[in-house]
Image: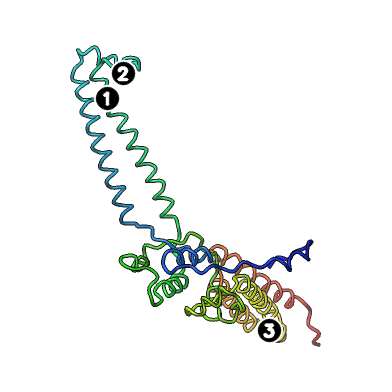
């Protein structure tokens, strides 16, 4: 929450506007989506998009065939001076008196218009296909709210979000596996209290928690896990300083494996990043052991 400075005496006379009650249906659904970025879930209508591209493609194929037929006709009439001139100079090609050239112009204008429509549709489809799907947890919460009795929309719109494979998220939240675990199983610990929006959502079986609380808890857990693995490995190796080399190598293998599992399972690190981090962690332990072994013993 942002603080306010200056003109403090005027704030007491200003009443905070209450959130207007929306009519069930499109108004309330729009308010729900606008209130939470996670809820910006929509249909991409993949089947309709693909079908539209196929139709445009076929229309262009038909126009291409017509242009090819005109080109073959011109090529077969080598004695037609107008056709030869129109094929070489724009002045003759754009001559309104040249009927054959006029056929070319009309066809070319149709091709230009349809080709522009087709290319725009292709680029838009590429952008739509690049949109990520919503997270399963988000989809489940959204559908629970949408299907709450009585249904938010009626008729065919009641099944608007049934096909989960056709849904896209406009504002997906980047998160890692640790955040997902906290959200799925411990989200109730971070829920926000004393909020009008929260009261409304709890009445519908949902609750709201600020995302920064999840991120803060995840950061704390990550810091403690990193410190535990590093300090725990060093302490364990120190406790076996008088033992043979084999047990100490075994400890290095165990702690390195745990470190790799934690990084791989609880973060979104790529494979190369996991290899790099694990190698660096193992190198620290190996250097510690080698330095400890190189020290002269105090025995007789």
Marked residue nearer the N-terminal end (1 or 2): 2
Would you say the residues marked 1 and 2 are in contact, meaning their CB atoms lie under 8 Å apart? Answer: yes
Answer with left or right where residue 278 lies relative to residue 136.
right
- Percent x, y for residue 50? 31, 52
Q: Which residue is mark 2?
A: 93
98 over 276 or under it: above or below: above
Give the residue displayed 38% in from the left and 76% down from the top: 150
Answer with left or right where residue 132 lies relative to residue 284.
left
- Percent x, y for residue 214? 60, 74
SS assignment at label 3:
helix
SS assignment at label 1:
helix
Q: Quadrant of the N terminus?
A: bottom right
Q: Which residue is mark 1?
A: 104
Of residues 227 and 106, which is closer to you in this image?
106
7 over 253 or under it: above or below: above
Marked residue nearer the N-terminal end (2 or 3): 2
Give the residue displayed 73% in from the left and 66% down from the top: 11
Q: Which residue is mark 3?
A: 236
Which picture quadrant has residue 210? Answer: bottom right
Distance from the alpha carbon under mark 2 to that under mark 3: 87 Å
Badge 3: residue crowd in 10 Å (few <14, some 14–19, many ≥20) = some
SS assignment at label 2:
helix
- Percent x, y for residue 211? 59, 70
Give the residue displayed 68% in from the left and 84% down from the top: 236
Answer with left or right where residue 175 lies relative to residue 124.
right
């Amino acid at each position: 929450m942002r603080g306010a400075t200056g003109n403090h005496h005027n704030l007491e006379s200003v009443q905070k506007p209450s959130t207007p009650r929306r009519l069930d249906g499109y108004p309330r659904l729009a308010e729900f989506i606008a209130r939470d970025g996670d809820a910006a879930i929509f249909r991409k209508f993949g089947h309709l998009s693909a079908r539209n591209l196929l139709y445009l493609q076929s229309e262009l194929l038909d126009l291409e065939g017509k242009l090819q037929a005109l080109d073959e006709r011109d090529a077969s009439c080598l004695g037609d001076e107008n056709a030869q001139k129109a094929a070489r100079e724009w002045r003759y090609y754009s001559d309104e008196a040249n009927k054959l050239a006029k056929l070319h112009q009309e066809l070319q204008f149709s091709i230009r218009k349809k080709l522009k429509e087709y290319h725009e549709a292709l680029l838009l489809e590429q952008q739509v296909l690049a949109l990520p799907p919503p997270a399963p947890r988000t989809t489940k919460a959204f559908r629970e709210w949408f299907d709450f009795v009585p249904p938010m929309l009626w008729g065919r719109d009641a099944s608007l979000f049934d096909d989960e494979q056709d849904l896209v998220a406009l504002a997906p939240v980047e998160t890692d596996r640790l955040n997902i675990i906290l959200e799925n199983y411990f989200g109730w610990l971070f829920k926000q209290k004393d909020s009008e929006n929260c009261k409304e959502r709890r009445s519908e079986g949902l609750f709201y928690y600020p995302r920064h609380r999840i991120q803060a808890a995840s950061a704390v857990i990550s810091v403690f896990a990193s410190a535990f693995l590093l300090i725990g490995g060093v302490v364990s190796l120190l406790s076996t300083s008088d033992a043979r080399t084999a047990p100490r190598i075994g400890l290095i293998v165990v702690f390195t494996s745990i470190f790799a599992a934690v990084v791989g399972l609880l973060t979104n690190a790529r494979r190369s990043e996991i290899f790099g981090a694990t190698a660096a962690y193992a190198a620290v332990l190996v250097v510690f052991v080698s330095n400890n072994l190189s020290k002269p013993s105090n025995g007789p």
